[in-house]
Amino acid sequence: MNKRDFLKGAILFFPAGGLLALARDGARAAAPGPAREAEKAAAPEAPKPSGKRYNPADHYYGMGIEVEKCIGCSRCVEACKAENDVPAEPYFFRTWIERYTVRADGEVAVQSPNQRTRHVETTDDRDVIRTFFVPKLCNHCAQPPCVQVCPVGATFSTEDGVVLVDGERCIGCRYCIQACPYGARYLDPRTRTAGKCTFCYHRVVRGLKPACVEVCPTEARVFGDLRSKASRLVRFRRMNKLNVLKPALNTEPKVYYAQLDGEVR
């Protein structure tokens, strides 16, 4: 077989990329030592493996919120929308902030700076006793009613304690939206599937904080692993008297509030 016939056979047998790679590798092998060392130095360094593969069974996530530290700046809301591609239209939020105004006559006005409002009243400042902000989000309950009512299993709990929605399985029936006692879900108008806070799960499994926690200027939000003694959240729970929202429902929320006023619903 002559050289031309051999090359024709090689082109038919090997993919073009594979043939080029063989030729390139052969050339590199024949290159002198200093040239190969220079090529290594110029090439970007490959990322080093972390050594331990992420195992959901080793973790159990939750969040703590110090109400007195929240200034209602809404940076957490903006960061969440940007990080998770939340619809830009009003009334679609994975986290939001409610402003509570307590009047001298005992009445409470609740308003959200982010347009997610349950009750709004104009109040004379002279009648105001105190005001405060309360961040809200999905509580990632240990006993989530949204999971129980989903007819197709699209809403589920992970081993590490995060409640997620499988967009490929969700049929947009809204059962989970109606079942959530915290108003933490919405129907995405683009996909017609349920949307909610995920604790930025795609970040957490890579060792990063949720976007809302990372941008908070007063560190009002604390995120961590409840199974780790070194977790800041474990210390937060140990050092503060904590409450959860709607405790009588027995959903076992994993969002814990410090300095939570009794007027908060």
Image: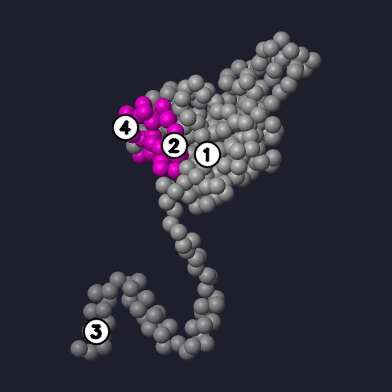
**Circles 2 and 4 in contact, beta carbons < 8 Å:** no
Q: Amino acid at mark 3?
A: Phe
The numbered disc on residue 62 is: 1
**Classed neighbour count for the residue bearing mark 3: other residues with Cα under 10 Å, few (<14), some (14–19), many (≥20):** few
Counting from the top left corner in percent of width and height, residue 133 is at: 66, 28
Q: Residue furthest top?
A: 105
Q: Amino acid at mark 2?
A: Val
**Classed neighbour count for the residue bearing mark 4: other residues with Cα under 10 Å, few (<14), some (14–19), many (≥20):** few
Is residue 157 on the magenta stretch? yes
**Is residue 40 visible to us here?**
yes
**Circles 1 and 4 in contact, beta carbons < 8 Å:** no
Task: Give the mark, 1 or 4, whose residue is nearer the N terminus.
Answer: 1
Counting from the top left corner in percent of width and height, residue 177 is at: 44, 26
Q: Amino acid at mark 1?
A: Gly
**Classed neighbour count for the residue bearing mark 1: other residues with Cα under 10 Å, few (<14), some (14–19), many (≥20):** many
**Circles 2 and 1 in contact, beta carbons < 8 Å:** no
Residue located beneath label 4 in the image:
152
**Is residue 190 visible to us here?**
no
| Quadrant hosting residue 22 | bottom left
Left or right, 93 with reference to 125: left
Residue located beneath label 2 in the image:
163
Report the Cα–Cα distance between label 2 and label 1.
11 Å
Task: Give the mark, 1 or 3, whose residue is nearer the N terminus.
Answer: 3
Report the Cα–Cα distance between label 3 and label 4.
58 Å
Residue located beneath label 3 in the image:
6
Task: Give the mark, 2 or 3, whose residue is nearer the N terminus.
Answer: 3
